[in-house]
Amino acid sequence: MTQTGDKADKTALVTEITPQSEDFSQWYLDVVRKAELSDYSPVKGCMVIRPYGYAIWELIQQALDRRFKATGHVNAYFPLFIPQSLLLREKEHVEGFAPQVAWVTKGGDEQLAEPLVVRPTSEVVIGTMYAKWIKSWRDLPVLINQWANVVRWEKVTRPFLRTTEFLWQEGHTAHETEPEAQEETLRILELYREFCETELAMPVVAGQKSESEKFAGAQKTYSIEGLMGDGRAMQAGTSHNLGQNFAKAFEIQFQGRDKSLQHAWTTSWGVSTRLIGGVIMTHGDDSGLILPPRVAPYQVVIVPISRGNWQETVLPRAQEIRDDLTATGLRVMLDDRDAYTPGWKFAEWEMRGVPLRLEIGPKDIEKNQVVLARRDSREKAFVPMAGLTAHVAGLLDTIQRALLDRAVKFREEHTTRADTYEEFKRIMDGRPGFVISPWCGDAECEAQIKAETQATLRNIPMNAVRWDAGGPPCIKCGRPAVAEAWFAKAY
RNA sequence: CGGGAUGUAGCGCAGCCUGGCUAGCGCACCAGACUGGGGGUCUGGGGGUCGCGGGUUCGAAUCCCGCCAUCCCGACCA
């Protein structure tokens, strides 16, 4: 909060949220803190996820877990620690992660004979177990997911977006054939894309990562990329086809239908608590958080108008409404605190992103109605008590859709094509967003673009235009392009 | 990990340059009263080893050294 003392701007003083236009990063940090999503902890780079933030995570978990189960996956749990020797077995993997791992070298008073790393990801532990479990083609596929915490020693951290320890899910599968592994990789990519749009109202671009942005040890990496309110992209999830790299390093072998000994084809994929950061930055405004109803801890907040003997007159009606709404499965908060005025509660719950506010006062009871106020559009409407439950449910669906539509529109408005490097640089210098440009496929061009503009190649969308030969000139070097790639400055 | 900035009550800050008595202010918090349809008013209160550790000094929030944390800009990453 950079507010200094402009008494005229009472709202800003009270909310203490920096406007997005002034400083988007500070806005984000203000929202995270004021909405009580997380707090800093005594441990460098590690955040506490507070109940309101954790409730969002639980809803994300439930919605994802349903989808994983529906596609044949099961949950399991693997150890937090990895023996050093195991980590060293996949060369690219260890090179990729070594700079970021935390080591355990002592247990109690004793120096460990072999140091342990705290998992930055679990390919090696799970791969080791798969080697034991998989003997025959009949054992395949193995489709396991784990909900866990991981640790990566990051230099720069930000709540939810990048923390030393974070929560995520990591799926690890093993398959009999290469096409099956590829199919799984893309199935999950699509599952993630659909999840983000349906539950988080967050449109994402699903596509393939370039060689240099690939996961350490993967054959192919795919990602979903969202566009945040400040025009920067955020990688919301990844899905990797690991080929036989890990199977070879960890000897995941099985006897095939043709009696020959073969290495399995594996995949891994994950999304993390970072998604919460994505939700905040996709939908939020200067008043604070705006939560999509599907992942809002409270979908409706009921604010009784506290006039006169409201606790005898208004409150019982409010309680009835709460019970009716709750009975249909909605998540409802009745804010019956006497210490705060209605206006204060309005502002408070808006800041915390509750999608729908229901006001009820003496006048409403007389007229047999309530007031419904939308967080996303701020529209207020009188709604008859009769049929209220259905109306509320319908309105929440409308809000969910409206948030997605708004986010899609924002992305479209901030996605530009550039065919010359001059144009590319001009766009990246000004209003950020996605820039779609032809690219030759050379990592050197990609690196130069990054060095000169800070923009990175986010991915090449699944439905992007590709050329085997005779593509238009690469944005950077002018050689024939292989595909249209999406670039952006990213989180 | 390099460059910069900040750290004083839950939040936002003043005080530091030029050392000195009991460390202030706004919001928040507690009690009571009046209030209540967009962040109410009044009265009375509580809360601080001034980020941590050393040093200089009769005396340190203030000066010096070291460390830690956070934020911003780079390099690295979900």
Image: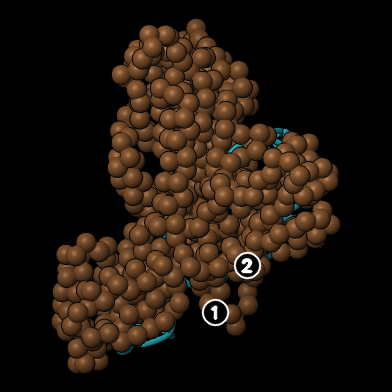
To which chain does the residue with label 2 belong?
A
Q: Which chain gets the cyan colouring?
A: B
Q: Residue at x 75, y 58 (%)?
A: A418
Q: Could you say where residue A166 lies in the image, as x and y percent from the top left?
A: 47, 39
- Residue A285 appears left or right of A483: left
Judging by the rendered image, the residue that carries numbered circle 1 is A10
Q: Residue at x 54, y 59 (%)?
A: A281
Q: Which chain gets the brown colouring?
A: A
To which chain does the residue with label 1 belong?
A
Position of A67 relative to A361 (above/below) = above
Mark 1: amino acid: Lys
Given contact means CB atoms under 8 Å apart, are the residues at marks 2 and 1 in contact?
no
Bin the neighbour count of mark 2 within 10 Å (Cα to Cα): few under 14, some 14-19, many 20 and up.
few
Position of B8 relative to A138 (above/below) = below
Q: Residue at x 31, y 69 (%)?
A: A300
Q: Quadrant of the N terminus of chain A?
A: bottom right
Position of A358 relative to A227 (above/below) = below
Q: Residue at x 37, y 33 (%)?
A: A146
| Location of residue A391 by image quarter | bottom left
C-alpha gap between disc 2 and disc 1 = 33 Å
Mark 2: amino acid: Glu
Tell me the element at label 2.
helix
Nearest the viewer among A242 and A387 is A242
| Residue A454 numbered tag | none
Judging by the rendered image, the residue that carries numbered circle 2 is A413
Q: Could you say where residue A376 lies in the image, as x and y percent from the top left?
A: 45, 72
Q: Could you say where residue B42 lies in the image, as x and y percent from the top left?
A: 43, 85
